[in-house]
Image (cartoon, coloured by chain):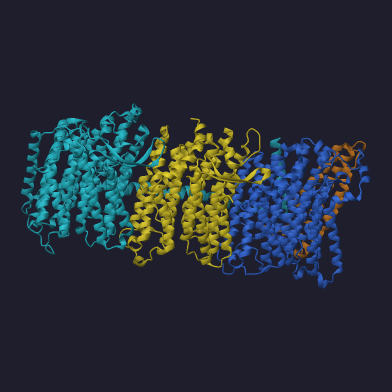
Chain colours: A orange, B cyan, C blue, D yellow
Amino acid sequence: MIEGIPIQHFLIVSTIMFFIGIAGFIMRRNLITILMAIELILNSVNINFVIFNRYLYPDQLQGHFFAIFVVGIAAAEASVAIALIINIYRKLKNIDVENVNELRY
Amino acid sequence: MYNYTILIPLIPLVIFLVTGLLGMKWKPIISGLLGTTGLGISWVLSVMTAITYFFGSHHEGAFETIIPFEKLWLTFSETLQIKMGVLLDPISVMMLVVVTTISFMVHIYSLGYMHGEKGFQRFYAFLSLFTFSMLGLVIATNIFQMYIFWELVGVSSFLLIGFYYQKPSAVAASKKAFIVTRFADFGFLIGILILSFITKTFDFAKLTNPDGAVFANAAGMSFMGISVMTWAMVLVFMGGAGKSAMFPLHIWLPDAMEGPTPVSALIHAATMVVAGVYLVARLFVVYHFQAPDALEIIAYVGGFTSLFAAVIAITQHDIKRVLAFSTLSQLGYMMLSLGVSGYGGEEGLGYMASMFHLFTHAMFKALLFLAAGSIIHAVHSNYMYEMGGLRKYLPITHITFLIACLTIAGVPPLSGFFSKDEILVAAFNHNKILFGVEFLVAGLTAFYMFRLYFNIFWGKDRHYHHTPHESPLTMTIPLMFLAFASIFSGFLPFHSMVTSDKMHFDTHLHLAVAVPSVLIGLIGIAFAWLLYKKESKVPEKLAKQFGILYTATYNKFYIDEIYLFVTKKIIFNYISRPVAWFDRHIVDAFMVGIGTVTEKISYRIKGMQSGQLQHYAFMFVAGVLILALVLVYYI
Amino acid sequence: MLSYSPSLGGGRGEALKFGDMNLSQFLMMRHELLLTAAALIILIAEIATADSAKRKLIPFTIALFAMVTVAGFFPVPEGTLFGGSYQSNPLTALMKNVLNIGVLIIFLQAEGWLKRPENSDRISEYFLLTVSTLIGMNFMISSGDFLMFYIGLETATIPIAGLAAFDRIRSRSAEAGIKLILSSALSSGVLLFGLSLIYGVTGSIYFTDIAQTITSNSMVALGFIFFVSGMGFKISLVPFHFWTADVYEGAPINVTSYLSVISKGAASFIFTIILFTVFKTLTEMWKPVIYTLAVFTMTVANLFALRQQNMKRFLAFSSIAQAGFLLLGILGNNDLGMSAVVYFVLIYIFTNLGAFGVVEAISNASGVETIDGYNGMYKTNPKLSLLMTLALFSLAGIPPVAGFFGKFFLFTAAAGSGYYILVLIAVLNATVSLYYYLRVVRAMFIEKSDNPVPTFKSSAYMRTALIICVAGIFAVGFASVIFDTIREISQNFLY
Amino acid sequence: MNILTLLIVVPVLTIIGILFTKDMKGARAVSAFGMTIQLIVAATLVFMYLGLRKAGVTDEMVFISDYTWFKSLNIHYTTGVDGIAVVMIALTAIVVFAGIFASWEVEYLSREFFISLILLATGVFGFFISIDLFTMFLFYEVAVIPMYLLIGVWGSGPKESSAMKLTLMLMGGSALLMVGIFGIYFNSAPNGGPLTFNILEISKINIPVEAQRFFFPFTFIGFGILGALFPFHTWSPDGHASAPTAVSMLHAGVLMKLGGYGAFRVAMFLMPEAAHEQAWIFIILTSISVVYGAFGAIWQKDLKYINAYSSVSHCGLVLFALLMMNETAMDGGIIQMISHGLMTALFFALIGMIYGRTHTRNIYEMGGLMKVIPVLSVVYVIAGLASLGLPGLSGFVAEMTVFVGAFQHEDLFHRIVTIIAASSIVITAVYILRVVGILLFGPVKDPHFEHLRDATWFEKLSMFTLVIAIAGIGIAPLWLSDTILDSLKPIVHKLAETNVF
């Protein structure tokens, strides 16, 4: 065990990160920032997996592996997202999410 | 031995079908002759039946009821079945004779009267249809067969009244006749239903069995405090009242005069209108033993109607209407005399008298109508103030008409005297008030008939646009025949033929009743002679004297108006219109409303799909929370 | 169903299993392998062909894929790979074949659109992306643990974002792409968080282990809700559906039909599997959730669909509503429900692709995409109108077309578990949906129009695709053997 | 092949045949041919059936043929008929036959018209021959849906909205029905064994009473909506008013009968206890709709509306009679279905023909037609008399059987509502005579009508087929009512043995 740091702290941190991420996604106007918010969410997930694995099920590695894959996929996702953001920028000449509402109702 | 009787109704039916389907192809006269000959045959047959039945086999005691033919037509349940059959007993045999005779006469008469009319074939087809239905009604073996033909009679009368279908008044009259009688038939139907519920049978044989076994479980059954049998029989009588135009269901009969005159003679004087009387007579046993109260009601309805109609008849100008009201009044006589009758022997005098009067009345009333027809044929008008001094133009019509008037006025020894006398006696024995009424009515009858007579044949003649001439033989022969009948039919021994218990009993003249009644008849005639023999201002003066009363009477006491108000105003405006409105604006609107509301909602919520990514994200999270709440709620 | 309970690396020693895994066992992944091979071949072909001859890639790829589809029908050995991360059984195989058929039809329909000049240089891109998403879905379908499931899911999602933004000239397309990728990222984030919680409780990511150890407690409940939300996004259930309409409208029609049929079908299939196997001990927990979702989805989607004008958007909402009906099958929570879901997806593929096919054909020919634009179309294009009518009736669940059977069995499943009121709501919703389907029918048959869609003859590919759809719409319903087989397979799978 | 299946095959073949025709002439020729065959098949069926009964076959259903369809759900394609179904099939065949000739001159998209018309008919036939609830429901919806196109495309007036209203209300009805059917299905094996949709098998077991209580209303109302049960009848006036002639004929003549037929064959037959418990509600509703429909008809101006409301009244009488649940009344109810089917079809045919000549359906704009188009007018009078229950025509037989039967009920409430319902015969007379008076009698209103063409040969064929049927039943009702009574016995028996009162 990591001395002195009970599991709750980690969990609290991850949860806070998760909700910060959500909040960020909902509030920030800039597409890139939204992307970062998503990264926050995914990382909170990673922390969860790793911590659970480390603290509760130390005799196996499933959580760790999961975290690694999540990181990888997040990267892929981010790359595609950024590509599309650039695409948007070409069209709208800005990356403010508020302007991305041509399709509605 | 009576198997051939089935032919009596079938012949007219066949003729109806043939003429109805192919008639348009032929020369008119062919269908006329066909119909007449056919009817002639059934007439001969029914007369044969009558003779063999009444005088043929020399029978002891009661006339037995014979059912020479019966066939199952429809099964409701094991016990309730409709059969089509022929039932022969005194009244039905007598009715056979009446119906075929009058119908035959009318057929002959119409050859001349309807000559050259458009739709001649149609007329004869309808005549045959009517005759068939009426005969079917007469020989019905069970109450439901009677109801079936009852309806058919109604519809054929509807068709014949509306014969001139392009004349709005005729159409209206036919409609009125049908709907009023239909309303009455509704009562009849309910009556039948109640009877069938109690007795589980339709057969007259069972119903009219004096021991009343089938009514066993009616005992103690009552609805709204009145015994169920009274209900049933009153409702049945309602049907009869409708057909026989008893007050207050009489309104259709005067208007029915819109039809061709032969039709009025056949249907609305001699045959169909007595169907009600026939019905009551047919079920007399039931009335007498199961529902005496109903019989009481019948007596009073009949009495009132006869008085009421007689009063109106005095004031009418349209000669056919006068005759119509006189018919009403005479029907009232018959009903009353059934109402006051008892069962068996001397007691059953009323019953016998009623049937007797039915017979004689058929003869002379048909005669009156046909004569009136011949008059109208001559002067092309219905109104007596356009007539006068016709006696020199229409000798035969004049004589026959006079005979008829004397007959109905009850002058001896003409048939009307005998039958009316019996009725008066019956009334006298049973109920003094009713006797008084009828006595008065006798006078009134004599008066208005002779008012009519003098107005038409005496007085100074109007200048007609072409001089009236006597009608052709086809029309005068029936007149003479019927005149003959109305003179002598009074001598038929009805008391030994048509009686309540089918047994012979002796009758004798009650001078105490006969003499005054003849006298009042003569008085009535005298008054008429004074007032109308010569042209005079007296009638107008009298009319002035009575003023409001006169106008009220002239307008038939505004009964029609009341009906009109009820139907047109109440039913149309205050029931059916609101119903239609309710259906459109409440029920339907509700169903449509569901749709519109849904559509409205869909427009309301369209804001959710704002196109803003972040709103979506927010909704997403909100959804997660909702689901969480759901779980919290369930766990 | 699995002979042992594997776990990755853990002390229970199943890691050894890797040792005995020989090549033959890889054949279990025949679908995935074939698809991967196909993808590579397409790449090579792309390189091999000259720019002028790119169009030849279309028939080539279609033929290739047809072969793949056919090959998929050969029986697949049952079993598991990678220590249980990958499982193969008749049911998954069946599902993959169903998807293959769908994709084949979509490829056939895509031809007209790909032929357009602006797409001429990217034909292979389209095929590659589509095939790769399909690979992802296949992995997702036969995933045996949440990791494989997640990888499959993302592999299936991310390329679609690219596809959605395929039309470079239309800014709507780009918007569709960004909306899809961002919101799907969010949803998978939430989903993952749920998974992490579940892992925290059960200590495993393997379906079988979880199924055995999971118990109902608040943390599991929370994790489950997050998971359902994530899946709800993929299947586009209200209230996680908002992206659907926009993306469907913005994306190229072909991609839209792919989204609405293939990815939705795959997602709902695996969702059902997971609910039936992993959470089978927690039915008390998930039934109310699904119930609520079903009611919301059917009702809201119908309400939105009522007033749509754009055909694609209209079909988007209709497909959401269909997803709602699908949940009724899941609520059945038995083999009948399972088979009803698969059967419905199968029918839904033919039906919806039929509808989208017509829409695509018309918009290729005349650019018309609105309902009013269809006015008086029966006069000019009777065949297409009839086909559209068939498809719409099938969507509305009107006999004798297949949709009726699909819906009927879904409802049967729900009613079998006693959800009569829900069934009533559903059928009433079906009635409402009939209203807007009939709107289109009315436009085509009843309304008169001054300039209706001009008469045109669509390409051979499109016609083939549509004929397949019609055949499916009729055959799948009447040929009871299909349903009976599915029922049998799912019985074997569940018990 | 089983003769019943033939009843479906013939129309389908006809449809296929129409597909190969080029124009109106071909289409109508093919459909006329096909439907004539169908009529013949139906007639043969009737005679075969009577023959079997005469031979002493006492099975509840005959000509049973059974193919397993969806094995896993135990769904079968099971056909079989008893006397009631047979006469309903005969009715349908007659009406469809007449309908084809009544729509002889549909120019606009005639092929499609005939195809949808015959498709509708197929559904109806299928419904009547089905014993299996699933196929029954399937055919039921097949019959309902072509309605939308038929009214929407070939209709008149506010056709879109009426068509939409009609379709949605009927589908709403089938929504309820579906729930009911599921309820029956899942309770069809209360003590183990495979679930089944087969009516006969279900009728042998007793569905748990609480289940019946819950599902009976769904099933009954579901069918009742199609049977124009107050207050769910409002689709009928608009629908009929907008529909083209043949469609009104088929719809009022046959399709509405599906409601009544299903109501007792499924709802009451399979759930007798609940039927007994809840009958009074529906008896009140139906007796309302009998009187209410008649009164509604009095005020209408549009011929089709008049007839639509009278249909509400008459169909109300059908359900009313069935709910009385004694042999005679139910017998009357079914005869009423037949009779109303025939005469309302005749009415709509006539209205269509008159409308085709005068181009108006407002009675106040017409008058004196008897002079200009005698044949049509006479037939109209006959139809009118039939509908106001004149002896010698079918209406009388039906109504009397209903009233007599209903009045035999031991319970006073039933007898009183019977009287209320019976009062409709007067009201009916009022509105029928009103129409006849205004429309046919009196002087010719509009000079343009002086030279109208009277009925053509195909119109006569269409009319007289129906007239003959009506008169036939009216004059010799015995065989019909006996046939029905025999087949009613098991149903009534099942109802009687579960009578909770």
Picture coordinates of residue B224, whole percent (x, y)? 34, 31
Q: Nearer the viewer, residue C472 or C223?
A: C472
> Residue placed farthest to the top in the image?
B220
The quadrant of the picture occupied by the C terminus of chain A is bottom right
Picture coordinates of residue D448, whole percent (x, y)? 36, 67
Q: Compared with residue B479, is residue D73 higher up or lower down, i.e. above or below?
A: above
For residue C271, side relative to residue D61 (left or right): right
Residue B586 visible here: yes
At horizontal 10% and vertical 55% (from top left) the residue drawn is B396
Q: Compared with residue C68, is residue C216 higher up or lower down, i.e. above or below?
A: above
Picture coordinates of residue C106, whole percent (x, y)? 74, 60
Location of residue B347 by image quarter: top left
Picture coordinates of residue D323, whole percent (x, y)? 47, 39
Q: Nearer the viewer, residue D261 or B582?
A: D261
Location of residue C20 by image quarter: top right
The quadrant of the picture occupied by the N terminus of chain A is top right
> Residue placed farthest to the bottom in the image?
C52
For residue D301, side relative to residue C264 (left or right): left
For residue C369, side relative to residue B573 (left or right): right
Residue D238 visible here: no
For residue C287, side relative to residue D501 (left or right): right
Query: How many numbered dots are placed on residues in this image?
Result: 0
Q: Compared with residue A89, is residue D7 higher up or lower down, i.e. above or below?
A: above
